[in-house]
Amino acid sequence: MDEMQLEVEIRACKNVLSETDGPIVAALEGLLNCTTTTAITNYLKALPDETKNLVTYRADIRQRMKDMQDIIDNGYTGGDGE
């Protein structure tokens, strides 16, 4: 990937994060409404697997964005590899 392709990919990753903000915000709001440690524990146990998987997916996207930005920041030299 060249630098332009990396920047396009970073923007696409940002779009994915924006598009998946809703369920994360809803989960955080639910968590913040818990007033006891028992309520927090129960809330987290009850979170759907889909939400838990989304958190992991978003972390992977953020890491990919960081990796691509590091390539750009460290003086992308071109070529076929990242």
Image (tube, rainbow, N blue to C red):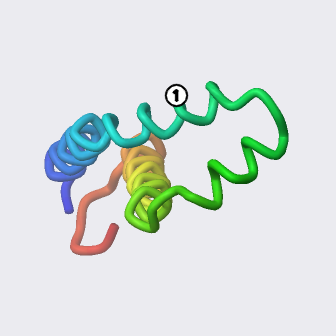
Q: What residue does disc 1 label?
A: 29
**Residue 55 position within the rendered picture, expressed as x and y whole percent measured from the top left:** 48, 54
- The residue at the far bottom in this view is 80
Q: Quadrant of the N terminus?
A: bottom left
Quarter where residue 39 is shown: top right
Q: Residue at x 75, y 51 (%)?
A: 41
**Residue 54 position within the rendered picture, expressed as x and y whole percent measured from the top left:** 40, 58
Compared to 12, does 36 lie above or below? above
- The residue at the far right in this view is 37
Local SS, label 1: helix
Q: Nearer the viewer, residue 68 or 60?
A: 60
Q: Residue at x 18, y 46 (%)?
A: 12
**Residue 15 position within the rendered picture, expressed as x and y whole percent measured from the top left:** 20, 39
Question: Dot 1: within a 10 Å radius of its alpha carbon, few (fewer than 14), some, or many (20 or more) residues?
Answer: few
Instruction: Using residue 77 as the reference point, say whether residue 57 is left or right of it.
Output: right
Count of labels shown?
A: 1
Q: Nearer the viewer, residue 12 or 5?
A: 12
Instruction: Using residue 42 as the reference point, say whether residue 63 is left or right of it.
Output: left
Q: Nearer the viewer, residue 73 or 29?
A: 29
**Residue 8 position within the rendered picture, expressed as x and y whole percent measured from the top left:** 15, 44
Q: Residue at x 61, y 35 (%)?
A: 31
Quarter where residue 45 is shown: bottom right
Q: Quadrant of the C terminus?
A: bottom left
Instruction: Using residue 70 as the reference point, say whether residue 65 is left or right of it.
Output: left
Instruction: Using residue 56 as the reference point, say whether residue 36 is left or right of it.
Output: right
Q: Amino acid at mark 1?
A: Glu
Compared to 81, does 16 lie above or below? above
